[in-house]
Image (cartoon, helix red, strand yellow):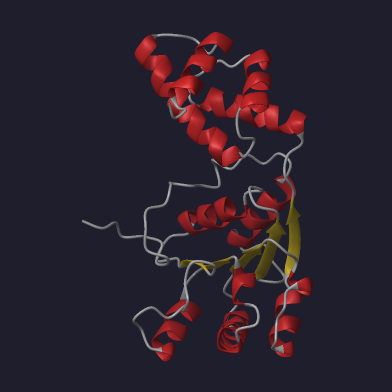
Amino acid sequence: MMGKRQLILPLGVYPPLTLEGYYPVPNAEALCAVQNLLGGERRNPSLYLHGSSGAGKSHLLQGAAAAVPGWVPYIDCKEVTTPFGTATIAEAFASLAAAPLLCLDNIDAWAGQRDKEIFCFDLYNERMRIQKPTLFASRQAPQIANWVLPDWASRVTACLQYVLHLPNDAERRVVLQEMAQRRGLRMGEDVARYLLRHHLRDLGALDRLLNRLDTRSWECQRELTIPFVRLCLAEGRPS
């Protein structure tokens, strides 16, 4: 049986991302802005997050969608060719306009597609009129996206904007150790440094690796030491 609340587009299985599970370093200000948006503390009900891949934009949008009661649409514009699905344009517009929160990820993927920009422009205006919050995200700032509709470009660039940054080495090490601590794992700085030197530095990939290490640590009744981590990394490599 499907849950009462779900992400509508694109179809597929998503990890259970939450705002509580978002590691704020170094983007605490953006996290606070999202929380304020959901809490009703806003002069502008539209928020635009942008930054490089791996900075946590999708996590914040999906976490925000999970935090709001009711049906909350999350759309990854990069993965869909139309925001309408099987519904008519009028049906989709009415549904998305009335949602308590709308999350449009990778919105710049629709830049240059006039029909989608017109749809977004009309949707944005209606949600502004009824003061419903909207969260946008993309890799680049809205000012430099290749919009073809000047009115839409003007609207979207008027959103409150936050740049999301990738953590530096020291910040990434702090986040990695906090990830381990939340799983009940004790990770010393030597192990954290080893992982950051010998594994992908993307936080999502590190999070998945920690799931593996957590399972293997439990199975083997071993603490996270460099030899044990080295063994686990070797197990995950193709022969």
Residue 74 screen position, x and y as percent: 48, 65
Quadrant of the rendered image containing residue 193: top right
What is the number of callouts on the image?
Answer: 0
Q: Nearer the viewer, residue 101 or 235?
A: 235
**In this picture, is 200 found above or below 91?**
above
Residue occupying the point 63% across, 25% down: 198
**In this picture, is 220 found above or below 145?**
above
**Residue that protrudes farthest toward the front in the picture:** 239
Q: Nearer the viewer, residue 171 or 204?
A: 204
For the C terminus, the image quarter is top left
Residue 28 screen position, x and y as percent: 71, 45
Q: Nearer the viewer, residue 205 or 157?
A: 205
Q: Is residue 230 left or right of residue 177?
A: left
Residue occupying the point 63% across, 14% down: 188
Residue 197 screen position, x and y as percent: 68, 25
Residue occupying the point 54% across, 9% down: 227
Quadrant of the rendered image containing residue 140: bottom right
**In this picture, is 171 found above or below 159?**
above
Residue 143 screen position, x and y as percent: 79, 73
**Residue that protrudes farthest toward the left in the picture:** 1
For the N terminus, the image quarter is bottom left
